[in-house]
Image: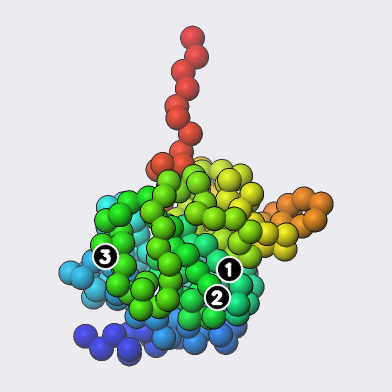
Amino acid sequence: MDFAAARKVMVDSQVRVNDVTDRALQAALLAVPRERFVAADRAFSAYAEIEPEVAGERRLMLARDLSKLLMAVGAKEGERALSIAGPYAAAVLARMGLNVTAQESDPAVFEVVGTALADEGVAAAVAPLSEPAGEAFDVIVSEAAVPGRPEAWLKALSVGGRLAVVERTGPAGKAVLYIRGEQGISRRELFDAAPPVLAELRPEPTFAL
């Protein structure tokens, strides 16, 4: 399979047509080998309009949705970024010149993507997803959805920092952009999306008599 050709088709048919106009982002998507961020026997599926499996419950976000999310976050060269449950997003941000840490709770994910992340200069951190691996980040993103406002992630932003994530409580979700300011945090809804929800962030069920 000609992965370079498949990458170009992906950018042309899934990214550019969805009003993703950031040239640096487009260039990064054309450069990062998405096929290296899925299980080796699923490399053929990396560029299809699906959410291919990485390992365990982890899947890559649709290229369309991820590109829109990353454009909204306005990443700038030299910024510090944290990609939670988003190894491919981490690599794309690194290609855009950011200093990136990829965080996963399941080491099996890094068994699949660790070499590719290292080649992109991305640091890897294994830690519970409810506990960001660091603080004062300019950018935080995730390729998975969260079941509500991710307070711990917001606390890990620097002033002026941006968090882009999908919030989902039912069959559909909403991509949102948070910006941390001097006086508080703003929230803006972006577009509809429905990636899998991070199971470990779901609240424990409660029972009342």
The span from disc 3 to disc 2 (Cα, nearest Å) is 22 Å
Front-most of 13 and 94? 94
Q: Quadrant of residue 3?
A: bottom left
- Other residues around mark 2 within 10 Å, as few (<14) / some (14–19) / many (≥20): many
Q: Which residue is mark 3?
A: 112
Q: Is residue 88 left or right of residue 164?
A: left
Residues at discs 3 and 2 in contact (Cβ within 8 Å): no
Instruction: Residue at 68%, 59% (x, y): give it.
Output: 158
Residues at discs 2 and 1 in contact (Cβ within 8 Å): yes
Q: Is residue 167 left or right of residue 116?
A: right
Q: Which residue is mark 2?
A: 98
- List x then y, in percent, for residue 152: 58, 45
- From this view, report whether residue 135 is shown above or below residue 6: above
- List x then y, in percent, for residue 135: 59, 55
The span from disc 2 to disc 1 (Cα, nearest Å) is 6 Å
Viewer can see residue 4 = yes
